[in-house]
Amino acid sequence: MGALHRGHLALVQRARKENGLVVVSIFVNPTQFNNPDDLEKYPKSLENDLRLLRPVGEDLLVFAPSTNEMYGEAVLSRTYNFEGLDQVMEGLHRPGHFNGVGTIVEELLRLIRPHRAYFGEKDFQQLQIIRKLVAAQNLPVEVIGCPIVREAGGLALSSRNQRLTERLRKEAAFIYKTLKAAKSKFGTKSAPFIVKWVRQQFRAHPHLKLEYVEIADADTLTPVLRKRKDRKYRAFIAAYANGVRLIDNISLN
C-alpha cells in the first residue's frame, strides 16, 4: 500500500531472484480501512516509493492505479468465506477489513496473473487469508511468505512507523522484546499463562496500550488452550503507541 520501506524492498529483491519479471503494485486500498481517520492519515508517497525502487532494478514494472481504475464508481468490497480465519485478532477488531483485502488482492492477481506473489509475515493473518483466497478462487499463483524485516531495536518495519517519533520507535521495540520473552516461556508454560503474562507486561508500560495478545495455531489461527506436539504456533500482538496501531508476531516452535 505504498510508503515503502526495507521490508517491502526485501520482497521485491527476493521476487527478482526467483523470477524473470517483477510487478510491484502500489495502491492504498480504501475498502480495508474500517476507520476513515486511519485511511486519511495513512502515508501516501508515490514519488518517494519510485525513488526507493530504482536501485532494486530499472526493469521493474510498477502498477499504481487510481481508486476509480480498481473499483469504478462503487467503492465496495466483496464478501468472502474465509472459514473463520477472519473472525479472530485483526478481523475481530477491524470489521470488514479482510473482505477489503480479499477484494483488492483477488483483483490484482486476476489482472496481473503472476506465477508467484510475495507477502510479508508481519501481516501473518493476512498471509493465511490470502492463501485461503487463492485456494477457494482456484487462482493459479503460488503465495510465498517472507520473513519480517526489523529496525535495529527489533520493531517490525511498517509504513505506520513513519508516524512515530524517534522516542516512540525505541519504546515500541518493547513489542518484539515481549514476543521473544513469550517464545522463551512457551516450552514450559501454557498458552493462557503466557497471554496473561504479556497483558501484565503491557499494563506496566507507560507509552504502549495493548489491543490484543493471542497465541494461535499457525494454520487455523485458532486460539490455543492446550498445546499439541504436531502443531505449529505463533504469538500475535497489536498495540497502540500514541494512537499509532502496530502489529507483530513470532513463531513459537
Image (tube, grey):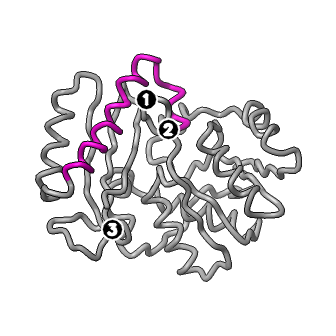
Query: Marks 1 and 3, how far apart in space?
Result: 26 Å
Mark 3 sits on what residue? 232
Answer with mark 1 or mark 3, whichever residue precedes in sequence: 1
Magenta segment includes 69: no
Residue 116: horizontal and vertical position, in percent? 68, 68
**Circle 1: is it few (<14), some (14-19), or many (20+) Cα within 10 Å?**
some
The residue carrying mark 1 is: 153
Magenta highlight: main SS: helix
Callout 2 amino acid: Arg
Distance of label 1 from label 2 (alpha carbons): 8 Å
Mark seen at residue 51: none
Instruction: Check whether the beta carbons of the residues at disc 1 and disc 2 lie within 8 A of each other.
Output: yes
Q: Name the residue under label 2.
A: 150
* Residue 206 located left or right of residue 164: left
Residue 105: quadrant of the picture: bottom right
Q: What residue type is labelled 1?
A: Gly
CA–CA distance between discs 3 and 2?
23 Å
Of 23 and 244, nearer the camera is 23
Name which quarter of the figure residue 3 lies in.
top right
SS class, disc 2: loop
- Say which of 204 and 101 sits in front: 204
Left or right side of 135 for 245: left
Q: What stretch is highlighted in magenta?
A: 157-185
- Find out whether the residues at labels 1 and 3 contact each other: C-beta distance under 8 Å: no
Q: State the residue at coordinates (78%, 57%).
A: 22
**For the residue marked with disc 3, what is the amino acid?**
Lys
Q: Residue at x 76, y 67 (%)?
A: 111
Q: Is residue 175 magenta?
A: yes
